[in-house]
Image (tube, helix red, strand yellow):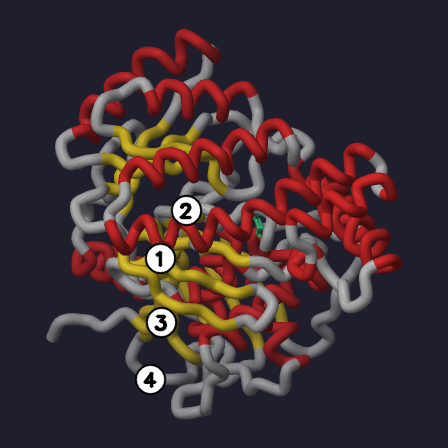
Amino acid sequence: MNDAGSTRSPARSRSARAAALLERLAALPASDGDATAEAPVLVRAPGRVNLIGEHTDYNEGLVLPAAIDREIWIALRPWDRPEVELTSAELDETRSFRFEGLAPAAGRERSWIDYVAGTAWSMRVAGLPLQGFRGVLDSTVPVGSGLSSSAALEMATSWALAVPGASRPDPAAMAAVAQRGENLYVGVNCGIMDQFASAAGRAGHALLIDCRTNTFTPAPMPPGLAVVVCDTGSTRRLGSSAYNTRRSECELGAKLIGEREPGVTSLRDVDEAMLERNRDRLPEVVARRCEHIVCEDGRVVATVEAMRVGDLEALRRLFAASHASLRDLFEVSSPELDAMVEIAMSVPGVVASRMTGAGFGGCTVSLVEPGAEVALRGAVMTLYPRLTGLKPQVYAVATVDGAGPVVQAS
Ligand code: GLA
């Protein structure tokens, strides 16, 4: 499914992709649920890359992700039954569930359909009407590499299940519904960033999201810079347990500081001076986690300004500081991510580079001057396997609009 080794966006045009998916839908074997003669519907939702602001979302902080042209598409026919039957074209696997009786179950073995069912469950709990459907899904978001294929699946599902004509919550509220599904039904304790970026993305922009107020401001991408994602090809070792540990450490830090400082309910309320005067009450490891979070919010604000005025030197510095902080203070980088950033920064024309997403493996994001993409790809493809023994992927990505119906050319 992935464009292995490509520096270009998925080559297939939108219309060819739509045609292939609709053909696949039409070829599904007959079923007695096919009562409806309604025209097929196509919906899409993008993955995301986070430019800066890492692990700040669950601390009510600031993040700066962009929705990218790696997308999940679903072609579907609404049907009369209160259930979903979905075929993954990639896995050639069909799964189904009924709306009735959907409930979180502890310890369930996780599969891709849980993200779909979890979204249905959460929409129901939120009082939103659901439309049953039979569909086919197709993805160009690489799974497990930190580009938020799960959030893309959830947001595509939220459109697939929408009853035509019914009012729909705004993208921020819908992202929160999907996040609740992932937290409570699937059992993954993620923050709001990924669903928010997939729901509300805007072409040509990153989104400055305030995860305390759940509001966003589009921030124009710096003109003339390309965004290149390099996948380390390393699995996210210890991913979810280490993620949960980081969350608890941050919560403990906020609690301990809040015992002495009135009004502190999360690390969003803590600034550097406050952290310093309370450092003595924090376990050393917790103090380091807090230092990352408290300083990262400032870097997000500074990055938006550097993008606005085209200050490349500031972008370089801010990305480098974020990466070093994630490596040394928050300890979520890996030798592979560090090697990838180092290789990227040795290439002339690469302005800035850092790990992106949860960490523990996954991808880096780089801002690159025109023409330097080819050199970056060459350096990564040659040097990275030598250093790590792993096979990298390099994707130049474009920023796109958030999830919604696919508008088909007539
Ligand atoms: C994962 C989570 C997000 C966020 C990032 C780290 O992508 O799903 O909510 O916490 O990690 O910034």
On the image, numbered disc 1 is attached to which residue? Answer: 206
- Measured in 3D between alpha carbons, the distance from the residue under mark 2 to the one under mark 1, in whole angstroms, is 8 Å
Q: Residues within 10 Å of mark 2 (few under 14, many from 20)?
A: many
Q: Is residue 326 visible?
A: yes
Q: Are marks 3 and 2 in contact (CB under 8 Å)?
A: no
Q: Is mark 4 within 8 Å of ligand 1?
A: no
Residue, x 62% and y 41% (percent of image)? 292
The three-letter amino acid code for the residue at tag 2 is Leu
On the image, numbered disc 2 is attached to which residue? Answer: 51
The three-letter amino acid code for the residue at tag 3 is Gly
Residue, x 63% and y 87% (percent of image)? 127
Q: Tag 1, which secondary structure?
A: strand
The answer to whether 372 is drawn above or below residue 397 in the figure is above
Q: Quadrant of the N terminus?
A: top left
On the image, numbered disc 3 is attached to which residue? Answer: 404
On the image, numbered disc 4 is attached to which residue? Answer: 37
Labels 3 and 1: the sequence-earlier one: 1
Q: Position of residue 52 (x, y in %)?
A: 46, 46
Labels 2 and 1: the sequence-earlier one: 2
Q: Quadrant of residue 279?
A: top right
The answer to whether 75 is drawn above or below residue 285 in the figure is below
Q: Nearer the viewer, mark 3 or mark 1?
A: 1
Q: Are marks 2 and 1 in contact (CB under 8 Å)?
A: yes
**Near-viewer residue (288 or 79):** 288
Q: Is mark 1 within 8 Å of ligand 1?
A: no
- Measured in 3D between alpha carbons, the distance from the residue under mark 4 to the one under mark 3, in whole angstroms, is 22 Å
Q: Position of residue 104 (x, y in %)?
A: 75, 65
Q: Quadrant of the C terminus?
A: bottom left
The answer to whether 99 is drawn above or below residue 280 in the figure is below
